[in-house]
Image (spheres, rainbow, N blue to C red):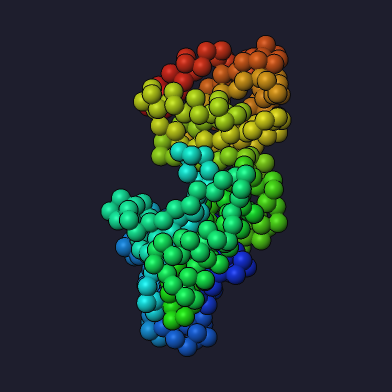
Amino acid sequence: MNLYEFQSKKIFSENGIAIPRGRCVQTAEEAVTVANEMQRPVVVKAQVLVGGRGLAGGIGFAENPELTGKVASQILGGLVKGKKVRIVLVEEKLEASSELYAGVTYDFRVRCPVIVASSRGGVDIETVAREHPDDIARRIIDPLRGFHPYMGRELAAEIGLKGSHSVQYARVVAALWRIFERHDAELVEANPLAIVEDRLVALDAKLSLDDKAFFRQKDLMEKIQEVPIDRMEDYEIRRYQARQAGIPTYIEMEGNLGVIADGAGTGMLTLDLISDGGGKTGAYCEMGGETTAELMENTLKAVFSLDRTRVVLVNLIGGLNRMDEMARGITSYLKKNPTRTPVIVRMSGTMEEEGRRILGEIGIQAYDNLYEAVEKAVHLSR
């Protein structure tokens, strides 16, 4: 789950990282009010979950309140890389003498977290790594030893910082690590982390959380739900509704084939087979370990909430889960929501015979062979 910039910045600020003054607004009139309060030039930033907003017209600058209203009007309601803008962040425009990068993520090659630092901020870090590898410093964090403050100081020195800037950078790195570890993050980065006179300020912030760790992050999830439901992007609305329904994983892709699996291994295999067969997945839901008929019903509802869904493939292996319960969930949904969209079910395992019988009563033949089920689903999706 990716957070909006303003949500990430709030968490940054709570952990001692300096951010520009500002707040989110939903109308041009509100933007003017914020600019009047600032009494200085401002930047208006579209709150959408995509990168490269500046080049896509999602960021504008204004020298006075009147111009702020015009810029906000141009951005609000428009599209930035296909995402409709419903909220903008209006914050003070700061002049940076230099822009840095600081971030924490996972290095899957060594299966450990890694802290990344660079003297080149404000651009995509992958581009810097490719074009200017000498301007990047890294520290692999051994899970047994953990993070130590000296690592931040070493990184600051490696990217050329000295004096108070070096001390502040080390503190920022420590704060980013604290956020990463405390909130089960997959990525946390300040880019650019600007040098503004004698202080370091995160002009932009990015925070991506592990969906499967939400059960440990209830306080954080309550805190960050600050986007009115009618102002969320359509995809985020569907993800939010899926989480509220107890679905651990809801992901959207570019295709029209809805996929439901009862585990990560089952799900990944299903996605690979669909791709190998020439199909394209649209909505993908993973129900997790022990599921119920109600969760099965809610998951079907989530997949069908994506308008372009043309066929649904349900792949179930009855280990912890009972196939008769899964069949009752499928039956309950289809009786309440009759549809001509084909629902292909493959089930195997605990109580599968009873599950097949229940599905047979509503005209659904459950497959035993996954390859046959995938082939049928891909064919129908075309």
In the image, 204 versus 340, the foreground residue is 204
Q: Is residue 368 visible?
A: yes
Q: In the image as oriented, which residue stretches furthest toward the left?
A: 131
Residue at image coords 51%, 17%: 370
Residue at image coords 55%, 25%: 266
Q: Does residue 228 lie above or below 272 as drawn?
A: below
Coordinates of residue 210 in the picture (x, y in percent): 58, 46
Residue at image coords 40%, 32%: 280
In the image, 256 versus 168, the foreground residue is 168
Label tally: 0
- Give the quarter of the figure containing the C terminus: top left
Quadrant location of residue 68? bottom left
In the image, 251 versus 311, the foreground residue is 251
Q: Does residue 265 lie above or below 17 as drawn?
A: above
Q: Does residue 310 lie above or below 213 as drawn?
A: above
Coordinates of residue 246 in the picture (x, y in percent): 67, 41
Coordinates of residue 83 in the picture (x, y in percent): 42, 55
Residue at image coords 49%, 25%: 269
Q: Is residue 232 visible?
A: no
Coordinates of residue 377 in the picture (x, y in percent): 46, 23
Q: In the image as oriented, which residue stretches furthest toward the bottom?
A: 39
